[in-house]
Each structure stands twice: as C-alpha cells, then as structure tokens.
Amino acid sequence: MFTSRIFTGGRLLEEINSKFREHLDHITRGVGILDEILRSYSTSSYENMREKYEELNKHEEESDKLKRVLMSLLRVSHIHPEDREDLLRTVLTIDDIIGLAKAVAKKILIFKHLQLEIPRNLHDILVNAVEKSLEAVKLVNNILELVRSDYEKALELTHKIEELEEVVDEIRLKAFEELLRECSISIKEICIVMPVVIDDIEKITDMCEDIADLFRLQLVSR
C-alpha cells in the first residue's frame, strides 16, 4: 500500500502520491472541524456551528473529487494489481472517514437547531472520543510521511493506531453507560438519536485501524 516502491519511480506515481496526500489532508481537516463543532456545542450559536459544518462539507466535496481522480490514476498506472487493490481500498476507506465525520456533525447541528441538551458528562466523553479519532487520522498522515524514510517508525505508528482504536472502544462503552444513566432518569429525544452518533464516532478509529492493517500487510507479506 504505502511502500516506497509504489510511490517512487515515475511521474504518474508521484502524482498519485501527491493526490493521496491532498486527499488525506482534507480528511484530517474535516475530522478536525468535527472536533471543533462538538467541543463548542454548549457555547456556540447555531449559525456559527452551521458555518463550521459548511466548511466540513466543502472538505468532503473536495475529498470526493480527489477520490475520483485517484481512481482514474490508479486505473492507468502500472502498479502491481495487488498493490493497486490495496491503494484503492485505502482511498475508499479514507473517504468513508470524512463521510462519517460529516454525518456526525450533521446530527449535532440538528441537535443544536432543536435546542437539545447533551448532558455534560456525556458531552465530555464524546469530545474525548473525537479527540482520539483525530489523533488516529493524524497518525495515518504521519505514516505516509515516514514510509519512504523510516519503515520501523511507520510500523510503530500502526501499533499506536491500534491502541487508539482499543481506547475508543472503551470510550464508546463508557458513553453508552452514561447515556443509559441519563435515560433511566427520564426519556429524552437524545436517548433515541445519540446511540447512532456514538457508534459513528467509534467507526472513525475502526477505519484508521483498517488502513494501518493494510500497511502492515504490505510491509510484512510483499
């Protein structure tokens, strides 16, 4: 997937590498905006949050364009079919990450518009989960930066992504516990819609781990 033999050796491969980095940059910025939206839920106005959401949406649109460009470049490249398949899976998985970030941000924006309260303890847990998700996405970026020069360091980062995924799994369970505690006192709208938000946040680190697994597969077996 990320190995140097794929990303060096010709102008087309360098263009793929450049577009790949650009694609990842939009995904990282998108998840970063989700982090800002969630953190500011209780202090930001609906209008400010909507502006942030529109900014995230632009990154998602640019990401989608780059996904199509990368698919076209990969189709005409002379990369080994197995490597091409790994790269395509990586591009699609990365694109799914910003799709999830956008879906979570949209739900939070709806909560704000309807003036739904997110309980303080639950909000803090969700902020922590998104913070870890953003960290995992940034590590994917770092892997791409290091793969040409330091395989061992890049491999170490894949293990850190795996650790973050396990941490977010635990945060997810904590979020459900807190939600159940709140909903056992009184049933609110948030009790119905919040489980989907919790699961979508957790899926972001799941996908980062999928990318890390693809890298490890490439490094160890090919």
Image (spheres, helix red, strand yellow):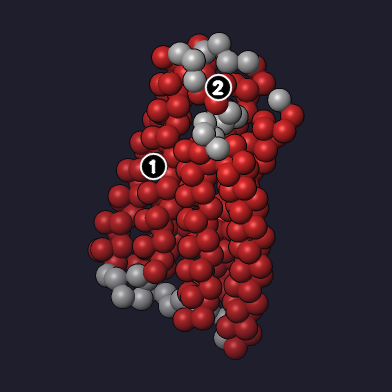
Mark 1 surroundings: few (<14), some (14-19) or many (≥20) residues within 10 A: many
Residue under label 2, please give it: 6
72 or 183, which lies in front? 72
For residue 207, above or below residue 114: above
Question: Residue 145: image x %, image y %?
Answer: 47, 38
Q: Quadrant of residue 89?
A: top right
Question: Residue 32: image x %, image y %?
Answer: 40, 55
Left or right: 41 with respect to 205?
left
Which label's residue is closer to the chain start, 1 or 2?
Answer: 2
Instruction: Tell whether label 2 touches label 1 (CB within 8 Å).
Output: no
127 or 192, which lies in front? 127
Q: Marks 1/2: CA distance?
A: 22 Å
Which of pointers 1 and 2 indicates the residue nearer the eye? 2
Q: Residue at x 62, y 48 (%)?
A: 156
Residue type, mark 2 in image: Ile
115 or 89, which lies in front? 89
Question: Residue 30: image x %, image y %?
Answer: 39, 49
For residue 188, above or below residue 127: below
Residue under label 1, please give it: 26
